[in-house]
Image: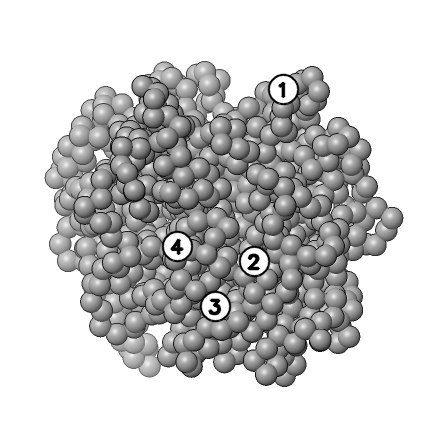
Amino acid sequence: MKISKVFFGVICLFFILLSFSCNKRSGDPRILVFSKTAAFYHESIPTAVAALQKLGAENQIIVDTTTNSNWFNDDSLKNYSAVVFLSTTGDVLDHYQEAAFERYIQAGGGYLGIHAAADTEYGWGWYGRLVGAYFKSHPAQQDAILDVVDASHEATKHLPSEWERKDEWYDFKNISDDINIIMTIDEDSYEGGQNPDGHPMAWYHEYDGGRAFYTALGHTEESYDDPLFLQHLLGALDYVIGGNKKLNYKDVKTQNVPEEERFTKTQLVEGVFTEPTEMAILPNLDILIAQRRGEIMRYDNETKDVKQVGFLDVYHESGVPGVNAEEGLMGIVADPDFKDNGYIYMYYSPADTSLNRLSRFEFKNDTIDHTTEKTVLEFYSQRGICCHTGGSLAFGENNELYLSTGDNSTPFDQPNEAYANHGYAPLDPRPGYEQYDARRTAGNTNDLRGKILRIIINDDATYDIPEGNLFEESEKTRPEIYVMGDRNPYRISIDKKTNYLYWGEVGPDAANDSLDTRGPKGYDEINQAREPGNFGWPLFVGDNYAYRSYNYATGESGEAFDPAKPINNSPNNTGLTELPPAKPAFIWYPYDESIHFPSVGTGGRNALAGPVYYTSDFPEESRYPEYYNGKLFIYDWIRGWVKVVTMQDNGDFDKMEPFMAGTRFNAPIEMEVGPNGLLYMLEYGKGWFAKNPDAGLVRIDYNSGPIENIKDDSATASADKPRGEALVASLDCAACHKVAEESVGPSYLAVAEKYKDDSHAVPYLIAKIIDGSTGVWGANVMPAHPALKKEDANAIAEWIMTLNESTGHQE
């Protein structure tokens, strides 16, 4: 019996050892040293690469080096026990490569970040958590004392307890609670430190299935001749190599990104619509399209035909010269039980009275039956002015109806006034200037404008207030309000799993900060509301950047508003004086490059929110891949892009990536998912207040089988166009200008005519194109294009001026 127990124990030990040996890679461990930079380049990188190669040769570690991010794919990465990010900076991987690296770590790979590796990929939250912190700032290089707080680790056990050396000492933000700190810096030993509570300098942790080590040291070339620092790196490599085990991709969570070529923009309708605004996809995949001027169109999924099935007499022109009305038929949505009741809800501006109305209609016999209209909700809206209507409709998981409303305020300068808005928050309290004070609407708890409302519709078209809205009913609050502090929440969506509300907020026009006098520059926003709240406008914008009170009679600036205790003391306010604390935006970006969300690009902006996609909601044969499960689709009307946002389990932002970046979308104004799991998009077309030839309805199809690289001809510029004309076609210019016709901006021919005798016209126009402009051709603001190269702006300006030389030029 004793012999058999011993024998059994030996057998178990044998299989354990066999399993361990089978899991171990053969030969010496191999690491990849990656040193690509997309921002600041550290001169020490070549010296560091050579030092790591030498360190590897002396310690039986094979070292491969590259700056080529194409190495980040499953087939390449699986060969490495660890990957070293050596003073990388900026966005060094695309979304395909990011997914591959996540999979590598989840399969058991190792990561070593050296110095500026923490100054990398700020828009990729997973990477920030892998590193353990992000770079914040640094003072000048100087001597300082490092404190070893864990001398048991291979990377520190050789070091003195206090190590004095010279380097560039990083401060950090977003420091993870899960890291194991082994070295800190004594902030009393140098000047400029900004992490006073145990300022970390080196740490390690297990993360998402793999191992990660980060050291902030290594800025200087001299570091890589320092035996103590090199031993520090060797100990870090020993940890992240982790026994040189084989990777196990069997249980990785991150899916590979589907190839862009698998998605096709299928044009269902083009050149038929006049100012389409919102659509309702019906259970049979027929689609109702609202047009701003009052028509309701229907796309027939079977016949592919479009016909008008209804009309509302709406206010859609201001009647005031130089003033564009944005009202009309703004929103449409089908009842969740449409298949049984045929109900359609529309939000519109009736022509005969100054209010906006939400009504229920019946759609029967292929027609909107006007005799069935039942008014659900209506409220005053000032007319004869511009702008901001909102007007989007969406149902939540419990059949609550959400309605977005704009602030009904004028963002342009007050005419003939010495002190005006200039693109900042309109806060003018003077009598006669009410339209220039958004505190009367968006900042007013007793007004339904500048809000997102939430109600429950009863069978008789009356409504109840659901539990949990922002306010109870009172003399100074409206119970319909779910979200307040909105400027122009033009497109909303509801996550049916979490009931989170998302919306795109079209922001103000100031191109530059004026923090000491007026406030921040303008930002568009994508917002997320997990609960009711005040999202700040017109006292705050973006990440709760505060505006200042302002005296429009004297030009004197007051104190900045406090997001923790916003005060609305406008005489035009009929609600509470003290507002709920302001909530910051989920995503925010200006005209120029965004520090926080660089992938959104630059130029004109018009943020819109699409759906959160869940694969389980749709048929397997037509739905998109699992990669998109739980992700939010967002888009921009002016910039023409679509992005996909990944969120953490709690809903926090994690990363943003392009979707069909090689496909041209013509001013997307609405995006929804059909019951077949496919995205449908309304394209307004590139031109304001017009029937655009490129307006249309598209479906995004997915091919799960073999693919071919098919080029989208719509995105290809004509080779025989002048360079300036081709640049105009590739930018956001078409949204505001046409060659021969006036739009919201002047025609290019009019510009050429105006400046035909001005010898300085080209440099003048270059400045206007890059810096933006207002007041030259009216109140409308021309967006800035600060990222545009001067030579490109020059080509555009020169092309515009050549139009004056042509006779009979046709658009």
Task: Tell me which amino acid carries mark 3.
Answer: Val
Relative image position of residue 668 (x, y in whole percent) = 44, 56
* Residue located beneath label 3 in the image: 673
Instruction: Return the residue nearer the eye: 534 or 74.
Output: 534
**Measured along the vertical axis of the image, is residue 483 above or below residue 331?**
above
For mark 3, give the secondary structure. Answer: strand
Q: Is residue 685 left or right of residue 788?
A: right
**Measuring 56% from the left and 80% from the top, which residue is drawn there?**
366
**Measuring 55% from the left and 24% from the top, which residue is drawn there?**
514
Relative image position of residue 310 (x, y in whole percent) = 59, 71
* Residue located beneath label 1 in the image: 418
**Measuring 37% from the left and 25% from the top, which residue is drawn there?**
755
Q: Quadrant of residue 662?
A: bottom left
- Badge 2 or badge 3: first in the primary sequence: 2
Q: Is residue 578 left or right of residue 279?
A: right
Q: Quadrant of the N terminus?
A: bottom left
